[in-house]
Image (spheres, rainbow, N blue to C red):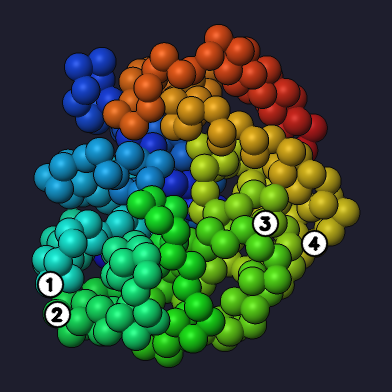
Amino acid sequence: MNKCINSGVWPTMITPFTNDDKIDYKALDALIDWYMEGKVDGLFAVCQSSEMFYLTQEERISLAKFVVEKVNGRVPVVASGNFSKDIYKQAKEIKMMADTGVDAVVILTNGLADKDDAHDVWLKNVQIILDNIPKDVQLGLYECPVPYKRLLTLDELKWCADSKRFLFLKDTCCNEDMLKDRLRVLKNSSLKLFNANAATLLYTLNLGGAGFSGVLANFFPKTLKKLVDTQQMDIVKASEIQDFIGSIAAIESRCYPLCAKQFLQLEGLDICTHTRSVDMSKYLPAFYNEVEQLHAFGKRYEKSL
């Protein structure tokens, strides 16, 4: 497809499952409609929110293909693509994901080197990937925190930007000083920084960040979109929205993505709360109350905008 990846709100998509633990494509269809009604600018399928490490390779490919076909070019779609330990197998996986029609295949930064490996090992493996996939496959980067978080150095970011093969960065550093330096390095490049951290979103937008790609877009995509759209026109209103967004982000700690599935039920979606990654017994009764109250409060706030 290769649609342009520029800016805006990109939900990290969740995967609905049936009670018997199969991907619920009917619920996924409705979920995509919900995202689109929220005026999102793109979709990140097959990510940690999607419980990608709990999906088979066949399920990951099927999931991405379904999203691409459902969206039908209305917004760009990206999806994670490298899961094997062997770097050459990763290149094959990336080609398979590219064949689904996604606009960019996202590379997990922690998949290219072990935790204690040097900078040179990471760069060498990136080059192997580039040498073993078609040159027209566009790429992204995701600093996934599992199994460990590998934050890119400024040199690595610049190398990726200079290669002109990378368009999308899901940034998870959550640090204003690092974000400032990263945006300086990426200025005027085709590699766009999408912040995963709600609390620092406005900060990055003010410095030229492209937008948001994170958990909270599974709760309030419209409000996040309003923040992105308002930032350059009304800084006072944007700051007010940022206060709301930052203050509610703690919901992410409530057995996510289970809490998001409960929230989406309150939005009227026929979606099961079953997950593969969360022990349901850890979802305390108080969490149900918190999600219900967040939903009610958030809907009132959205109306005020």
Residue 251's x, y, as percent?
Answer: 61, 31
Q: Is residue 133 above or below residue 66?
A: below
Observer-nearest residue: 280 or 300? 280
Q: Which mark is residue 15?
A: none
Assign a secondary structure to mark 2.
loop
> Can residue 112 be spotted in the picture?
yes
Q: Residue furthest top?
A: 285
To which quarter of the image does residue 271 belong?
top left
Residue that mark 3 sits on: 201
Q: Which mark is residue 88?
A: 1
Give the residue type that dot 3 points to: Leu
Residue 285's x, y, as percent?
Answer: 55, 9
Residue that mark 4 sits on: 233
Observer-nearest residue: 211 or 131? 131
Give the distance between the C-alpha atoms of the residues marked 3 and 1, in whole angstroms. 36 Å
Foreground: disc 3 or disc 1 = 1
Mark with earlier residue (4, 1): 1
- Residue at x 33% of width, y 39% of height: 51
Give the residue type that dot 4 points to: Met
Mark with earlier residue (4, 3): 3
Give the residue type that dot 1 points to: Tyr
Image marks 2 and 1: residues in contact by CB distance under 8 Å = yes
Q: Residues within 10 Å of mark 1 (few under 14, many from 20)?
A: some
